[in-house]
């Protein structure tokens, strides 16, 4: 989803003058980024103040995850170490097992493998629990995946990372179909920065062992704004991501500085995806994970789902109300 930027008439006029296009558009881009960051900080003031008045106390495990995030932009932890509840993991794992063996999932896998991949151009290699991101689906309050995103064990980490009450805008379970073929890399398989906000946090809970053969995500630590690689191909101001050319990217960011998020089943990965990352191609075995994302309250990216206010309890936590924009 690309945001069209309507530039002022004066900018468009001077940009048409021979020799002035590059400096004029460059100056306007710099001003626009500055103005958007001012807007971002101003529009998040209430969320920061409310959070400061009721900061949660993180336990030692949560604190370790937070420190890893703050240091490099990515961190991981075993689900059971964070939650300390084997029964909770077994429940979620059982739900995913039943979903994977459903006729609907098997049929989508068959269609993709038997030729659907030839027409793929974005994320057709994914089978999704809730369907396409643009469907505006209604998720019931008691959805186990919605409840996972609002659980204090993860939501408190997200809020502490942002230092404000965050907005939750995406949740789903993905089954990445494994298929070896010679087609080009598509969609999120290419290096990119996510759009939506200047600071983001995505979570990935693995329900299979994930390695390069199943399309493990690759990530560039220290590529957020202001860091070692933060100046390269910044997000298009104010709402779009960035997609650098593959060859130029490899020249500027050596593979020794790439991190491959290959971890065993039961791992929970936290990553700020305003930094560079890409999803690998699954060619030997499927990658199955739950994924959800948090942004600041200033984010204008549309939420990928709706929750019926009539079904939500009044006694939900303040953090959950902020996350679902129900204050």
Image (cartoon, rainbow, N blue to C red):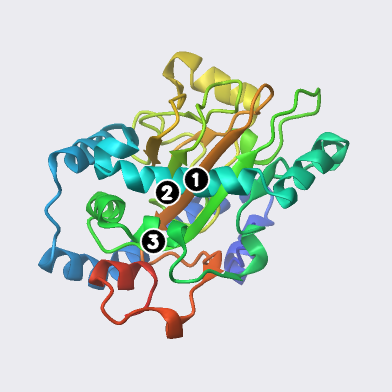
x, y percentage for residue 259? 44, 23
Q: Can residue 273 be seen at all in this image of the molecule?
A: no
**Residue density around tag 3, few if under 14, some if 14–19, many if 20 or more, within 10 Å:** few
Distance in Å between CA atoms under marks 2 and 3: 13 Å
What residue sits right under mark 2 in the picture?
91
Instruction: Please tell me which residue is depicted at 19% across the width and 38% down the height of the picture.
Output: 61
Comes first in the chain, label 2 or label 3: 2
Left or right? Give the position of 271 relative to 280.
Answer: left
Residue 194 versus residue 213 in the image, above or below: below
What residue sits right under mark 3 in the picture?
147
x, y percentage for residue 97? 56, 42
Residue 166 versus residue 175 in the image, above or below: below
Instruction: Please tell me which residue is depicted at 35% across the width and 31% down the height of the picture.
Output: 222
Q: Quadrant of residue 243?
A: top right
x, y percentage for residue 176? 64, 37
x, y percentage for residue 306? 52, 73
Q: Can residue 56 be seen at all in this image of the molecule?
A: yes
Q: Nearer the viewer, mark 2 or mark 3?
A: 2
What residue sits right under mark 1 in the picture?
94
Q: Quadrant of residue 229?
A: top left
Residue 136 versus residue 102 in the image, above or below: below
Distance in Å between CA atoms under marks 3 and 1: 16 Å
Left or right? Give the position of 179 relative to 139.
Answer: right
Q: Element type at marker 3?
A: helix
């Amino acid at each position: 989803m690309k945001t069209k930027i309507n530039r002022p008439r004066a900018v468009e006029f001077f940009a048409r003058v021979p020799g002035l296009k590059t400096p004029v558009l460059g100056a306007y881009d710099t001003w626009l980024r500055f103005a958007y960051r001012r807007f971002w900080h101003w529009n998040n003031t209430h969320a920061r103040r409310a959070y400061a008045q009721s900061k949660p106390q993180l336990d030692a495990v949560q604190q370790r995850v937070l420190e890893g995030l703050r240091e490099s932009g990515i961190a991981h932890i075993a689900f059971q170490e964070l939650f300390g509840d084997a029964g909770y993991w077994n429940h979620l794992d059982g739900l995913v097992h039943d979903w994977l063996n459903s006729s609907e999932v098997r049929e989508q896998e068959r269609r993709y493998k038997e030729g659907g991949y030839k027409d793929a151009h974005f994320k057709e290699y994914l089978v999704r629990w809730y369907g396409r991101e643009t469907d505006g689906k209604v998720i019931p309050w008691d959805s186990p995946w919605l409840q996972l995103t609002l659980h204090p064990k993860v939501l408190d980490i997200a809020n502490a990372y942002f230092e404000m009450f965050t907005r939750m805008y995406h949740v789903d379970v993905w089954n990445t179909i494994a298929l070896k073929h010679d087609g080009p890399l598509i969609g999120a398989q290419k290096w990119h920065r996510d759009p939506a906000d200047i600071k983001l946090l995505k979570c990935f809970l693995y329900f299979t062992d994930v390695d390069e053969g199943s399309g493990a995500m690759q990530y560039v630590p220290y590529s957020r704004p202001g860091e070692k690689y933060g100046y390269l191909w910044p997000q298009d101001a104010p709402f779009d991501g960035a997609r650098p050319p593959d060859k130029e990217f490899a020249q500027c960011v050596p593979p020794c500085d790439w991190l491959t998020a290959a971890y065993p089943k039961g791992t929970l990965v936290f990553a700020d995806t305003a930094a560079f990352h890409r999803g690998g191609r699954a060619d030997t075995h499927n990658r199955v994970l739950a994924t959800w994302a948090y942004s600041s309250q200033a984010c204008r990216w549309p939420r990928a789902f709706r929750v019926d206010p009539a079904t939500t309890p009044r006694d939900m936590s303040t953090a959950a109300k902020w996350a679902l924009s129900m204050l």
